[in-house]
Image (spheres, helix red, strand yellow):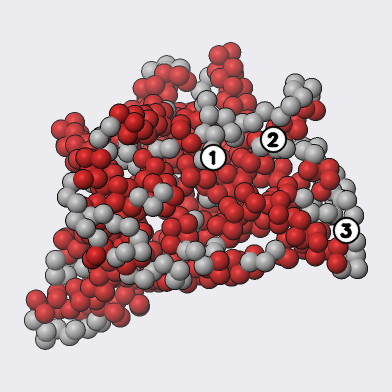
Amino acid sequence: MSKVKVQTSATDKMISVLIYTMFSLFALICVYPFYSIIINTISANDISARGDVVFFPKQIHFQNYLDVFKIPGLWDAAVISLGRTLIGTTLTVGASAFLGFMFTQEDMWGRRFWYRFTVITMFFNAGVIPWYLTMKSLHLTNNFLAYILPTIVAPFFIILVKTFVESTPKELQQAASIDGAGIMTLFFRIMLPISKPILATVAIFSAVDQWNAFQDTLLLVTDSKLYSLQFILYNYINQASSLSTMVNLQNAGSTAMASLSTKQTTTSIRMTVTIIVVAPILLVYPIFQRFFVKGVMIGAVKG
Amino acid sequence: MRIHYSKSRTSFIKFLYILPFMILLGIFAYYPLYGWVYAFFDYMPPIPLSQSPFVGLKWFRSLVENQVKIDQLLQIIKNTFGMSGLNLLFSWLPMIFAIFLTEIKAVRFRKFIQTVTTLPNFISWVLVYSLAFSMFSSEGIINGLLKMLGFTDSPVLFLQNSDHVWLTMWMWSTWKALGWSAILYIAAIMGIDDSLYEAAHVDGATRMQIIWYVVLPSMIPTYFVLLMLQIASFLNNGLEQYFVFQNAFNKDTIQVLDLYVYNLAMGGGSYSVSVAISMLKSLISVVLLFSVNKLSKLLRGESIV
């Protein structure tokens, strides 16, 4: 950034005002949808269903967040989504760390070939349907492994790690090798500790990918026990009305008769599930934002 | 793995360590190419491929066998070109976004804007659709607002509209990706040497002149690479965005190749035709990639892949 104080002329001021206004507007467009859904989920459902909750919540209540878990399958989906995120991320980070490190080993047999073999898959794929057909032939339909196995070797993350390792001083590895450390010792003792920042970035990218994944469920899963939250949300958007009736029936059976303001509507169900699905992202995002940025910047230095 | 091992032996052992991962990659990134053989058979599940009749190039010919099919394919190609074209046409937006964002001198405000505008990139298309639904469906907030302000009595059916699908799809992808795509350019601007600014200032350059002569040139290499990659993936719009936004009303104008291929197979059971189109699409994409790579070598003396 320029540290020189630039003269401010009238046009400069006008430009500044314009810039501030445009960015504020765009920021508003980015945030408002989230905000509006949140205030709708905690407002009286009858008011919300009429589309009358626009700026502030009206008659705040939290019944929706209790009711939404009465929808069959939501818990299961949450477990699936959490499971694939935790397991998938762990394995992807491990594999990316290891491969990123191994590809810096100049004496590895066929290093250049295998590195290309890996990277080229970023630019080329057979297509969704051939992929589906071959996955089916491998019995990876309706199989939890289909969420995990294909994501383990991730070229982009490998490039990130490799670029990072190459930027660290070579002397560290050399000294350890001379002391007789094997390649695995080198990896666990030297490489893992110094790569923590980049591995954190990879972990977050990978976790977001896993949490957001939708296409693999769409193609490979018909067993509702394996549905992810994203997939279930997609279904709910299209069939929320039957679900709201069902939750209302359950509530009507219980002693607490649902009043109009807490009675589930199509809107309330859809919006509450939306918030539940987006919540993890919204919660971790502010904390990890700097990692995202760092990741992209390292990735920009092509591996 | 001690020093007494021969050099070639340690070298091969290192390879053995990565072998399991290369096998995984082989299975999930290369083996699907074998799926292309389905394009040459009359595959009708549940009959397995091994018992399906070999039909040669039948499915490829069927794509252009009569006017109806040609028209349909042309519409799909038009949609693909339309949407990719719009994205290409506005590919400079993130660059402008970055330039003006870094012009903001109030650091906290700038950080805030950057954080907030990057957020949509991290939610899935399903969530985007859910937000869109909450905003723009007939009982959505926008219609509520329009009614409240007295602009309209009957709700406007934004999502069922088939008139401006290309534009609305472009708007959603821009909403989602703009802030994020700007980061690379922001990085490029941050990397500009302060002395350049000082020199420009000494020469009496105005703010606009500094942007034009100092800032913009520093971003051109990044822009060029991204543009080339974008051209290379011209046919690959992706499936998710168009899948979640598609409905009975906008189907004609929203179906890009990726969605069409999906609908053909998973909706209509025409796996073989679908694979045939997939295959053509992948092959053209590879040609595109090599072409832009060559172009990049010619123009900048540097390959992008």
| Three-letter residue code for mark 2 | Ser
User: Can you identify the residue that label 1 sits on?
Assistant: B247
Dot 2 or dot 1: first in sequence order is 2
Question: Within 10 angstroms of label 2, few (less than 14), some, or many (20 or more) residues?
Answer: some
Q: Is residue B123 left or right of residue A126?
A: right
Furthest toward the top, the residue is A10
Residue plotted at (78% across, 43% down): A49
Question: Left or right: B56 with respect to A208?
Answer: left
Instruction: Name which residue lies at 32% across and 38% down.
Output: B235
Q: CA distance from mark 2 to mark 1?
A: 15 Å
Q: Position of residue B148 (x, y in %)?
A: 80, 28
Q: Is residue A96 visible?
A: no
Mark 1 belongs to which subunit?
Answer: B
Q: Nearer the viewer, residue B233 or B110?
A: B233
The residue positioned 47% from the left and 57% from the top of the image is A218
Which element is circle 2 on? loop
| Circles 3 and 2 in contact, beta carbons < 8 Å | no
Q: Position of residue A286 (x, y in %)?
A: 60, 53
Label 3 SS:
loop
Query: Does the residue at mark 2 contact the one at mark 1 (Cβ under 8 Å)?
Result: no
Q: Which residue is mark 3?
A: A258
Tag 3: amino acid: Ala
